Image (cartoon, helix red, strand yellow):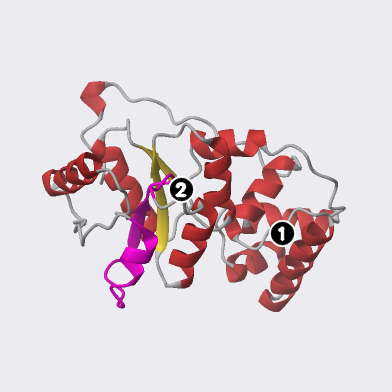
Amino acid sequence: MIDDHEAAMIGFEGGILRDGKSPAVTFAGMAPTVDAFLKAGRRICDVVALDLQLADGSRPGDNTARLIAAGYKVLVFTSGDNQAYLQEALANGALGVSLKSEPMAETVNKLRRVAAGETIDNLELAAAIEVDTDFVEANLSERERECLAMYATGYGQAQVARRMGIAASTVKTNVDRIREKYEAAGRPADTKVELYIRAVEDGILPPPQPKRKWAASSRTDVGQ
C-alpha cells in the first residue's frame, strides 16, 4: 500500500489480516510515496493499492505509470472525491478503484481480481468516463468496432480471433490500427482500460452498471 496517512495504512493492514479467506492475500508492506516504495529495489508484491493524493505532490498518472513500468498491477485506493485524479490513474493503466469507505472485504476481493489481471468496471470508473466527454470521432470501421468491443471487455487476442473467425495476427493489426486512429483523434488509448473507456465514450460498449446488492443472508460468498 502506498499512502501517507498512518491510520489508513494500519487499518488496511488489519483488514487484510482479518480477511482470512482463500486464496489468501498477504500484506507485503507500506510506503508513503512511490519513490520510497521503488527504492526497495526488488519486486515485493503483485498489486499496489495506491492513494491518489500523496504529500509529496506527485501526480497519480505518473505514479501509476511508474508502478506499472516496474511490474506491478495497480488498484486505486481512494476517498473518490477527485475525478480528475481518477481519470489520470485509469488512463495510465490502473485496473480498478476501491473506495476507502467500502467494506474491507470488498477491497480484498478487488485486490484478488486485479492480481488475476481483471479490469474492475465499477461506478468510480463510470464516473470518470462521464467526466471525459470532449472528444472527436475516431471513425472506426464496423469490423474494428466489433474487435474493440470484445478485446476491451477482457478477451485475449486469440479469443477474439476465434470469435471473429480471423487470425490472431489480424486481431493484433486491428487493435494497433484502432489505437492509431484514437491517437490521431487526440484520444490516446495505449492501455486496455483506455480502450474500454473509448469504447464506452463512442457507444460501442454500454457504461458499467452498479452491481446488485445482495441481502445480508446471501453474502456468505463475498471475497470467494
Q: Cα distance, mark 1 to mark 2?
A: 23 Å
Residue 12 place in picture, x, y as percent: 22, 44
Q: Earlier in the sequence, mark 1 or mark 2?
A: 2
Left or right placement of residue 217 versus residue 206 in this view? left
Q: Residues within 10 Å of mark 1 (few under 14, many from 20)?
A: many
Residue 42 inside the magenta-drawn segment: yes
Amino acid under disc 1: Cys
Q: Residues within 10 Å of mark 2 (few under 14, many from 20)?
A: many
Q: Is residue 115 above or below residue 200?
A: below
Left or right placement of residue 219 versus residue 185 in this view? left
> What range is drawn magenta here?
33-55
Residue 134 place in picture, x, y as percent: 77, 39
Question: Could you tell me which residue is drawn at 20 percent across and 34 percent down?
Answer: 220
Q: Is residue 222 visible?
A: no
Of tags 1 and 2, the one toward the viewer is: 2
Which residue is nearer to you in this view: 141 or 43? Answer: 43
What number is the disc on residue 147? Answer: 1
Helix, strand or loop status at disc 1? helix
Q: Is residue 64 above or below residue 78?
A: below
Residue 98 inside the magenta-drawn segment: no
Question: Could you tell me which residue is drawn at 68 percent across and 42 percent down?
Answer: 200
Which residue is nearer to you in this view: 68 or 58? Answer: 58
Residue 92 place in picture, x, y as percent: 56, 57
Question: Could you tell me which residue is drawn at 18 percent across and 56 percent down?
Answer: 24
Helix, strand or loop status at disc 2? loop
Overall secondary structure of the magenta section = loop
The N terminus sits in image quarter = bottom left
Which residue is nearer to you in this view: 168 or 120? Answer: 120
Left or right placement of residue 91 versus residue 7 in this view? right
Task: Identify the residue under disc 2.
Answer: 96
Residue 138 place in picture, x, y as percent: 84, 52
